[in-house]
Amino acid sequence: MNVTGIIAEYNPFHLGHLHQITYVREKLNSDYIIVAMSGDFVQRGTPALLSKYTRAEAALLCGADLVLELPVQVSSASAEFFAGGAVSLLNGLGVVDQLCFGSEEGTVEGMQLAARILNEEPQGFRDLLKNSLKQGMSFPAARSQALGRYLCTLHSLGEKNLSAFSDTLLSSPNNILGIEYCRALLRLHSSIKPATLKREGSGYHDLALKNNQAPSASAVRAFLSEQSGRTPSSDSVKDFSALENMLPAASLQLLKNAFSRQEFLTENDLDLILHYCLTGQTSEELSKYADVSPDLAARIINCLNDYRGFCQFTELLKTKELTHTRIQRALLHILLQIRETPKELSFGRVLGFRKSASPLLKEIKKRGTIPLVTKPSSSAKTFTADKKKLLDTNTAASNIYESLICHKTGRAFVHEYQKQMILIP
């Protein structure tokens, strides 16, 4: 049994994601594909466009065999903790042979070298990092600069131009995340082997849609936001023809169905509830939430009278040291009352699977070191305090997502415990 793991958000599922699954199946000769997928909130600190069940269904219809949920404490974390939690989940299953991820680099050697440096933190690297921080850079930028400069002092990369190599390696989002995956595998002494697929199509932040080219998820979301703002009714479905050559047919149909029912969320849907959560709190209380430093907490309090909405407030809080994404994550953690991020996950929540993957589930039950959760209500009664806290926080976040959808659509609320897994023949 050859099993490959993929870590993803599928926000939404597009041709680039399908290409990766096809590559894993055909080039890595995988019998089964397990996806560790973000739940209802994603790493950039916003709600996912579509619910986790809709995105899990898209993944299964497009070739995945089993989709597990990354709980919100991990899915909304910075790259290091996002990668660490996701890798620990796949590692705990006991069946995953390789982890496949997309990257701009296209090879794992450089990322593995960078991962070892970041894990071991040799003195030369620490000195460079200290100097970069003294220049007033944000920590992510300072660490990238220090790592690039340290790599340029090494000679283990053959005839490559080290400076150009390090600049390319550390300036691309998928490369950075790939390095964090490699770091996590090293920390866990995991037997899972990293494998990378060179990213093709639009760049990570590219907002342009190009015919017959895998788009960035950001471009798809930007297009959909524009369409929903222009015609917020089911009539907007006719405008989705621009996505026909950019999303797999199954994913596009699910997207159309969700938009026809108004069952999607954007940052703007957080405007009112976030303001409510911020009102009445002190800077000391705010600083207890994940990613909220004392300085940011004080800035939130000082700027609160000028709050107009999630996106506007993020821009208002922006400083040289704080990125938009860091601020969005901090605000989301306040809204969802997330105070810490687990380094490892102690269970795997099943969102859906193919019925033909039953041998895989049996093997996980036999070889795994963490349980699979198929009925959260039952697991909540038997879990230890730590596991239950992780499950309860994630359940509350999903219920907030559901509440926002219900407010938008007018349909009845369905508690997270009442929702059914996605089963595909």
Image (cartoon, rainbow, N blue to C red):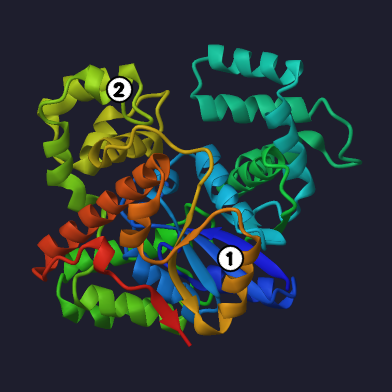
Q: Is residue 117 visible?
A: yes
- Say if 36 sits above or below 127 in the image: below
Label 1, secondary structure: give it.
Answer: helix
Label 2, secondary structure: give it.
Answer: loop
Mark found first going from the N terminus, 1 or 2: 2
Quadrant of the rendered image containing residue 256: bottom left
The crowding category of the residue bearing disc 2, from other C-alpha atoms within 10 Å (few below 14, some 14 to 19, many at least 20), is some
Report the front residue among 382 and 211. Answer: 382
Question: What percent of the width, then of the height, locates residue 341?
Answer: 44, 37
Q: Is residue 246 visible?
A: no
Question: What percent of the width, then of the height, locates residue 374?
Answer: 41, 66
- Say if 363 sits above or below 164 in the image: below
Question: What percent of the width, then of the height, locates residue 15?
Answer: 52, 73
Identify the amino acid type marked 2.
Ser
Identify the amino acid type marked 1.
Lys
Residue depicted at x 16% and y 32%:
278
Which residue corresponds to mark 1?
A: 365
Question: What percent of the width, then of the height, locates residue 221?
Answer: 35, 61
Report the front residue among 159 and 129. Answer: 129
- Say if 28 sits above or below 43 in the image: below
Numbered tag placed on residue 207 in the rendering: none
Q: Quadrant of the N terminus?
A: bottom right
- Say if 67 sits above or below 90 in the image: below
Report the front residue among 335 and 177. Answer: 335
**Between tags 1 and 2, which lies in front?**
1
Which residue corresponds to mark 2?
A: 287
Whether pointer 1 and pointer 2 mark residues with C-beta atoms closer than 8 Å, the reply is: no
Residue 251 as seen in the image, left or right of residue 164: left
Residue 294 as seen in the image, left or right of residue 402: right
In this view, the residue farthest toward the right is 158
Residue depicted at x 22% and y 42%:
310
